[in-house]
Image (cartoon, grey):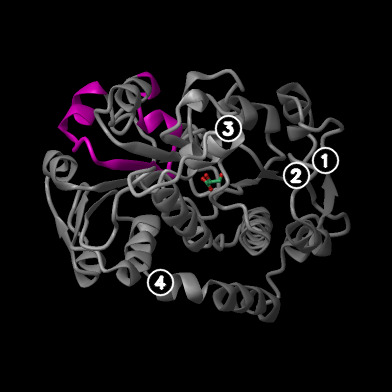
């Protein structure tokens, strides 16, 4: 998905709603003549923008607990017409079974769908929405932040201050340059492309990418498609921006880490399980690679005593990629529109292409 798609998303959102209004196909008028549909929102902290959108057409209910338990969500699933699934709890056939005849549509509030049993939705042709694209900018910003923080040893520097070890001097805490570097992006989808655009301002030397197929959008950004091994061997910075699937599980492991430069920085803004974290910890300790910047890890939440957090060359943040006010508002609105459209049996704003 290109940048203009990302920039136009709000405009399209408005048009989508206007079209619905003009055609009279508003969800509430299409279903339940007389009574309003009911939508379950699985997390009480979901941005109001999305909740208010739902409330225009539906009654909205929430689980009692925060965070909600799976059992209460399953119980409520049978009492509603649609679900806005907020969070990464497994979304599978069990939910659809418990939803029964009444449940018409579900939308997640995420781009990643690794926690969803897509086969089950496909098999049942059950309307499923998600919220890609709108988070590309926020996630790409985070990726660049991690690249700089890890490459320039920010965490190690902070630890030195905390431990009264501020030494200073011309050889202290030297990091890696970005200018002139080779950057590799594994997965040139919307987020990968948005990272590539950000990098244009950094005067990098070469931009490589790997993936299942070449992308004209990537070539237009000056990126060259190479086999993954070549990307790992050549890159000074490696970004992971692929979805987690059976194929990408532990794609970065002891063997692939060994192919990387000892000066390389690994940045993961996708999913923790794409990296074999034990192997990464070993590689960071032994100097197989220089540093890592991680927005995602295994497990999440990461226990405070996890060895990863003890490493000075690992910059670790708690899955904040899409965590900006505007991005989360947009995600909530799109998820709400998806649910409303699904209940109305009209095309979703952002259907998952299963
Ligand atoms: C996503 O949308 O997949 C992000 O990781 C936030 O959940």
Q: Residue at x 60, y 72 (%)?
A: 13
The tag earlier along the polypeptide, 4 or 2, is 4
Q: Position of residue 324 (x, y in %)?
A: 63, 58
The tag earlier along the polypeptide, 2 or 3, is 2
Q: Position of residue 84 (x, y in %)?
A: 68, 46
Q: Position of residue 253 (x, y in %)?
A: 27, 25
Considering the numbered disc 4 on the image, is that residue within a helix, a strand or a loop? helix
Considering the numbered disc 2 on the image, is that residue within a helix, a strand or a loop? strand
| Marks 2 and 3, how far apart at CA | 14 Å
The tag earlier along the polypeptide, 1 or 3, is 1
| Marks 1 and 3, how far apart at CA | 17 Å
Q: What residue is pinned by disc 4?
A: 3
Q: What residue is pinned by disc 1?
A: 62
The answer to whether the residue labelled 1 contacts the one labelled 2, judged by CB atoms less than 8 Å apart, is yes
Q: Which mark is residue 41?
A: 2
Whether label 3 lies within 8 Å of ligand 1 gets the answer no
Q: What residue is pinned by disc 3?
A: 91
């Amino acid at each position: 998905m290109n940048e203009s798609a990302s920039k136009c998303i709000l405009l399209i959102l408005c048009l989508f709603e206007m079209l619905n209004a003009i055609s009279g196909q508003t969800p509430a008028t299409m279903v339940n003549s007389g009574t309003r549909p009911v939508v379950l929102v699985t997390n009480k902290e979901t941005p109001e923008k999305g909740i208010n959108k739902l409330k225009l057409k539906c009654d909205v209910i929430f689980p009692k607990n925060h965070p909600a338990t799976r059992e209460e969500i399953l119980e409520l699933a049978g009492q509603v017409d649609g679900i806005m699934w907020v969070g990464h709890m497994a979304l599978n056939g069990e939910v659809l079974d418990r939803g029964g005849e009444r449940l018409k549509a579900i939308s997640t509030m995420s781009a990643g769908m690794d926690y969803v049993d897509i086969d089950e939705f496909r098999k049942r042709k059950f309307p499923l929405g998600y919220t890609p694209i709108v988070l590309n900018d926020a996630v790409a910003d985070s990726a660049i932040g991690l690249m700089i923080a890890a490459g320039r040893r920010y965490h190690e520097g902070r630890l030195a201050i905390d431990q009264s070890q501020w030494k200073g001097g011309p050889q202290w805490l030297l990091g890696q340059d970005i200018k002139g570097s080779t950057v590799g992006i594994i997965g040139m989808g919307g987020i990968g492309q948005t990272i590539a655009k950000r990098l244009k301002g950094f005067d990098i030397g070469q931009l490589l990418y790997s993936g299942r197929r070449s992308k004209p959008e990537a070539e237009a950004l000056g990126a060259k498609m190479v086999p993954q091994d070549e990307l790992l061997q050549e890159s000074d910075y490696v970004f992971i921006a692929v979805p987690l699937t059976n194929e990408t599980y532990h794609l970065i492991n002891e063997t692939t880490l060994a192919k990387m430069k000892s000066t390389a920085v690994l940045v993961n803004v996708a999913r923790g399980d794409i990296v074999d974290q034990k192997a990464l910890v070993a590689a960071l300790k032994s100097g197989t690679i220089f540093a890592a910047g991680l927005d995602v890890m295994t497990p999440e939440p990461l226990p405070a005593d996890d060895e990863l957090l003890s490493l000075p060359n690992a910059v670790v943040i708690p899955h904040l990629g899409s965590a900006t006010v505007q991005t989360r508002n947009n995600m909530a609105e799109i998820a709400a529109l998806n649910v409303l459209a699904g209940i109305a049996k009209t095309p979703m704003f952002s259907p998952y292409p299963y």
